[in-house]
């Protein structure tokens, strides 16, 4: 039994070190060491393994249980980016924002339009809408809209100023300034570089050699995309920092929490899920294990009072995010 405990101890130390390494994404960009960003994908699994081993040490009556539990408190905020609890907010919402990566071609344009309209949002951010041969959704409640090749923005309020944010490669970003109850707000819609994956590329088989080849292929595919993400989020960060108005940023980041992309943006804006979200934040569900790659961020002087990932219908490989905001004085 002593040998097994020694093996478990070494394994637990390795897991804790790997969890700590994911936090280095806040400081080390993908162009320097992209494997750290790859490691961020494993954070939920590493955390589950860490907690299971903590339970094992507790039931084994080992002092090391308290050591590992104390170390685990360092990961509370990273965990809250995935699963969170927020007290209900008493402030009245001034407006609602919906962000949704939709696939109109696969699920029917009219069905998607009705679904989006049912939220009665004041502002709608769509990603990958431009890929549809049927064209962008028609949202009758929205008087104003702005479309890029991949993304779209809809507003019930008049758009004062709008423009594209120049991105390298296959990502897309845009902004629109809108007056909301006397306050000018800059809305930014983003779609970071996609990985161009399909299920056959990640689905394991009974052939170990084939699985090994798939793993190597995925790593080769991920590395250059991480580096493109670095360039794109730096462009976004600079744009946000120069904005003279409060910012709401929403979209499909193709990046999980604990990634370099997340740390970069959360350094200039707050994650609305941490402020007002409850439950799981996972939004992409096309594979067996759901992950969080869709976000809504905002400036400090905008307060989110409600954050919901709506899982009532599967009209895309993403679930939409609805966030309510109140205007701070």
Image (spheres, rainbow, N blue to C red):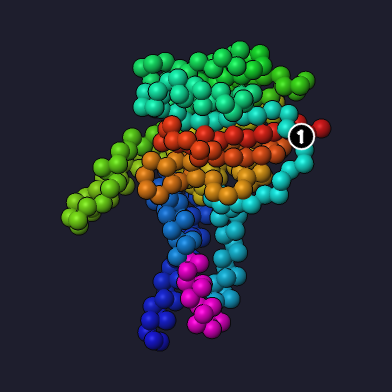
The 10 Å Cα crowd at callout 1, few under 14, some 14 to 19, many 20 or more, is few
21 up-or-down from 128: above or below: below
Residues rendered magenta in the picture: 50-64
Residue 55 magenta-highlighted: yes
143 up-or-down from 70: above or below: above
Judging depth in this view, the residue of 44 and 262 nearest the camera is 44
Circle 1: element type:
loop
Q: Residue at x 69, y 33 (%)?
A: 325
Using the rendered view, name the quadrant where residue 93 is placed.
Answer: top right
Residue 317 magenta-highlighted: no
Which residue corresponds to mark 1?
92
- Quarter of the picture containing the N terminus is bottom left
Using the rendered view, name the quadrant where residue 128 is placed.
Answer: top left
In the image: residue 254, left or right of residue 165: left
User: Of all residues shown, which one is farthest toward the right?
Assistant: 329
Residue 216 showing in the rendered view: no
Location of residue 319 in the rendering, given as x and y in whole percent from the top left corner: 48, 37
């Amino acid at each position: 039994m002593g040998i097994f405990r020694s093996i478990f101890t070494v394994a637990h130390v390795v897991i804790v070190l790997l969890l700590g390494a994911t936090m280095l994404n806040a400081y080390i960009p993908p162009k320097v060491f992209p494997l750290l960003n790859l490691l961020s994908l494993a954070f939920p699994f590493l955390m589950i393994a860490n907690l299971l081993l903590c339970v094992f040490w507790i039931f084994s009556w080992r002092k090391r249980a308290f050591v590992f539990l104390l170390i685990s408190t360092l990961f509370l905020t990273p965990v809250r980016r995935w699963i969170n609890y927020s007290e209900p907010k008493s402030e009245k919402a001034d407006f609602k924002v919906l962000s949704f990566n939709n696939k109109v071609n696969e699920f029917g344009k009219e069905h998607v339009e009705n679904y989006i309209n049912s939220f009665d949002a004041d502002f709608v951010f769509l990603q990958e809408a431009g890929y549809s041969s049927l064209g962008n959704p028609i949202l009758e409640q929205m008087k104003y809209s702005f479309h890029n090749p991949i993304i779209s923005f809809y507003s019930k309020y008049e758009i004062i100023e709008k423009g594209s944010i120049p991105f390298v490669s296959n990502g897309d970003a845009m902004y629109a300034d809108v007056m909301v109850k006397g306050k000018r707000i800059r809305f930014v819609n983003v779609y970071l570089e996609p990985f161009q994956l399909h299920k056959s590329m990640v689905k394991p088989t009974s052939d170990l050699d084939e699985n090994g080849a798939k793993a190597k292929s995925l790593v080769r595919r991920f590395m250059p995309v991480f580096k493109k993400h670095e360039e794109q989020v730096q462009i976004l960060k600079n744009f946000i920092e120069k904005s003279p108005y409060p910012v709401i940023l929403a979209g499909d980041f193709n990046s999980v929490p604990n990634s370099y992309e997340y740390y970069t943006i959360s350094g200039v804006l707050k994650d609305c899920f941490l402020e007002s979200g409850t439950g799981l934040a996972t939004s992409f569900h096309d594979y067996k294990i759901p992950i969080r790659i869709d976000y809504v961020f905002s400036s400090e002087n905008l307060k989110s009072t409600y954050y919901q990932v709506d899982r009532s219908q599967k009209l895309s490989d993403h679930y939409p995010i609805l966030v309510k905001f109140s205007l701070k004085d």
